[in-house]
Amino acid sequence: MGSNKLLKVEGLYKSYGGHQKGRERNYAIADVNLSAASGDFLTLLGPSGCGKSTTLRCIAGLESPNLGTITVADRVLFSSDTGVSVRANDRGLGMVFQSYGIWPHMDVYKNAAFPLQVGDRKSRPSAKQVRERVERALEVVQLSQFAGRSATALSGGQQQRLALARALVMEPPLLLLDEPLSNLDAKLRTDMRFELKRLQHEIGVTTVYVTHDQSEALSMSTVIAVMSNGKVEQVGTPREVYGAPAAEFVARFVGSANLVAGKVAAVSEGEVTVKTPDGLIVASSQAGLSIGADVFVSVRPESVALSPVVDGGAHEPGEWEGVVDGSAYLGMTMEYRVKVGDTEWNVSGSSESPLADGTTVRLNFARHGCAAVPMAMSN
Ligand SMILES: Nc1ncnc2c1ncn2[C@@H]1O[C@H](COP(=O)(O)OP(=O)(O)OP(=O)(O)O)[C@@H](O)[C@H]1O
Ligand SMILES: [Mg+2]
């Protein structure tokens, strides 16, 4: 029954609060399916309240699901079918939560050693093993030189790393991180992103990471599961969820894409031509769209090239024309607002020869940055 997946979550449902007779349950997560191969960095990405923490806490054993199966390294930790439910402490997983719960009365070393010194006396490692593991963990998070310092005398980022060291000393098969960078300032957060990724790579620990920050997800993950409303909308590599969103929600949430409504006018291998009120656009698409289908085309701001229309020019059918309606200088790039018909577009361009407000421009789309997704049934 072996599998190359280190983590498998199948058909997971969790509802908080009691079951009221005759009422449909309100599920915080419903039918969540996820998997991670050994060494993966799997990120659960989605807006506040979509069920990320609930999913993670179910894996950790801090919540009891109503239905489903959770398997780590071929060991069933939870199964509603067979009634298996391993206690959180016996799952042997590493966890770091948003509030990282450093023990203020202990120094750095003792904080890191703590998890190895609680729990079942028989299964505790020897003093020598504890020392070796703690020293290694502190080294990995680059806190060795602070081992004797009081935990309260650490900066936010250092406390964060200490929390991580504490999870790492367990040498867990799976590391669960719930928004572990959310309390840090922007600069430190970016630094920690790199640090965390390096660390995860170095020790090769399979990680499930929760965030609502898409750039965090895109920059750190090997796999992203985009969640909305208790459901997983898409699972894919950062490149896939960014460049080839499979659902309207994903297109809206990941990146700052422009979404244009239209109808599929032609279909060919892996591509569709979409007719919109403002012009034609060729987009990649997941298989299965047919002519006449209502779609959104998501267009990345960096996939639109703007060229000034000098002659006031002939406007061919299907061609896109707009007017620069505002701009912001961001160093390397310019962010433009471009008015096309009744729609405001976000376009980024080079800041070398910026376009002035009021310039009439032609829009050209890079095909790989345009993806057609079926219009969601609701809204
Ligand atoms: N202990 C609880 N009791 C009742 N409802 C809860 C509880 N914890 C979470 N919920 C509800 O379950 C849903 C999912 O919550 P969850 O904490 O998993 O969201 P999240 O994606 O982690 O959000 P955030 O980004 O804000 O942390 C929400 O509607 C939330 O209100
Ligand atoms: Mg949460």
Image (spheres, rainbow, N blue to C red):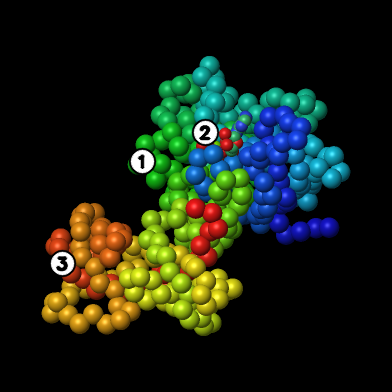
Label located before the other in sequence (3 or 2): 2
Q: Are marks 3 and 2 in contact (CB under 8 Å)?
A: no
Q: Is residue 131 visible?
A: yes
Asked whether mark 2 and ligand 2 are closer than 8 Å, the reply comes as yes
Task: Judge from the rendering whether residue 249 lies leftward or rightward of residue 354; answer left or right.
Answer: right
Q: Amino acid at mark 3?
A: Thr
Q: CA distance from mark 3 to mark 2?
A: 47 Å
Indicate the secondary structure of the residue bearing disc 3: loop
In the image, which disc is placed on residue 359?
3
Provide residue 43's location: percent of width, then percent of height: 55, 50
Q: Which residue is mark 2?
A: 98
Residue at image point 55% right, 48% down: 228
Label located before the other in sequence (3 or 1): 1
Q: Amino acid at mark 1?
A: Ala
In the image, which disc is placed on residue 252?
none
Indicate the secondary structure of the residue bearing disc 1: helix
Q: Residues within 10 Å of mark 2 (few under 14, many from 20)?
A: some
Q: Which residue is mark 1?
A: 186
Indicate the secondary structure of the residue bearing disc 2: loop
